[in-house]
Image (tube, rainbow, N blue to C red):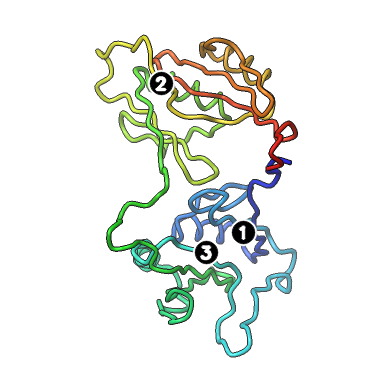
Amino acid sequence: MGKRIGSSLTVFMVSDLARSQRYYREVLGFDVTDWWAERDGLQALALKLLQAPEPSAVRPNPPEPGSDTGVDVYAYVENWTALDELYREFQAKGAVIAREPVVYADGGPWKEFIVADPDGYHLAFGGVDGNPAHRTISPHIDSVILWVRNLERAVDRYSKLMGLEVRQEDRLGHLHMFHFDNGTHLMLDSNGMDEVPVPAKGPVLFKIGTSNIDKAAREATELGFEIMHGIVRLEPVSYFNIRDEDGNIIMVAQNHPENRKDGL
C-alpha cells in the first residue's frame, strides 16, 4: 500500500484568531492561510488555528511533573547552527521566549528553547548538533531551478500544472519562487535568458507525482507542455516526460504499489 498520509496539523483553539494569525505570520515567520499556519512546509511545523467558542476552550498543555513550562508542540531542528539562527530571528521580531536556550547532556547532547504565543501555547524548538566537523552542507535538496525566457508565462503555466499559489511576495525581480508543502521550492529564473537559444535536447531535471497518469497527461497538454514519447506503462509505475517552451524536461509519474512484487 502506498503512502496515504502526507502531513498532520496540531490544532490550537485561540481566543483571538486574527491576533494569533498575525503573531504567527509576523513574529514566528509562518506561512499563514485560512486553512493552516506552517513553517518550512506542511511536513515540517504545521498548525491549525481555530477560533475558540469561549475562553475555557483555550487550553495550553500543563507542565509535566518536575517542569515549570508545558509544551504543546516540539519541533526538531537539524543542527545547533540552525537552532541558534532561529532563536535570534524570533528574539529580533519580539517573540515571547518562555525558556531561554538550554543544553541537556542526555540525548546527544540536546539543546532547546521555547517560545509562547498570545494564548500561552508553547512551541519548543530543539535538536542535537547534527553537522559533523567535516560537513557543513545539509543532505537536503532545498530548491530546483528552471531557466525560463518569459517569466510571467512560465509562472502561470507551472502554477496551473501543479495547483500552486502565485504570491507577489515570492517574486524577486527576474525570479519567482514556488513553495511546496514539504518545504522545498521551485524557482523560475529568467535572468539573462532573452538571447539564449532553447536547447534541442536535455535530461530530465526532476520528477513530480500524480494519482491519475492519463488525466495528468491531458492537463499538461492543455497547458502547452509537449509530451515526449507518450505514456510509458510498467507494472510498478507509469510515467511520461513533458517539455516546456524553454526546453526544460520534467517527469510525471504514478506509482502502482499494488503491483510491486517485493512487498515493499
> Residue 261 shows which numbered tag?
none
Q: Which mark sits nearer the N-terminus, 3 or 2?
A: 3
Q: Estimate the spatial distance between the alpha carbons at disc 3 and disc 1, rounded to whole Å.
A: 22 Å
The residue at 31%/28% (across/down) is 174
To which quarter of the image does residue 50 belong?
bottom right
Residue 251 to residue 45: above or below: above
Residue 86 to residue 238: above or below: below
Q: Position of residue 175 (x, y in %)?
A: 34, 31
Q: Amino acid at mark 1?
A: Leu
Q: Secondary structure at mark 3?
A: strand
Q: Position of residue 236 (x, y in %)?
A: 67, 29
Look at mark 2 in the image and give the residue it sits on.
203
Q: Is residue 193 left or right of residue 45?
A: left
To which quarter of the image does residue 81 belong?
bottom left
> Residue 17 shows which numbered tag?
1
Q: Residues within 10 Å of mark 2 (few under 14, many from 20)?
A: few
Mark 2 and mark 3 in contact (Cβ < 8 Å)?
A: no
Q: Amino acid at mark 2?
A: Pro
Q: Secondary structure at mark 2?
A: loop
> Residue 75 shows which numbered tag?
3
Residue 238 to residue 171: above or below: above
Quarter of the picture containing the N terminus is top right
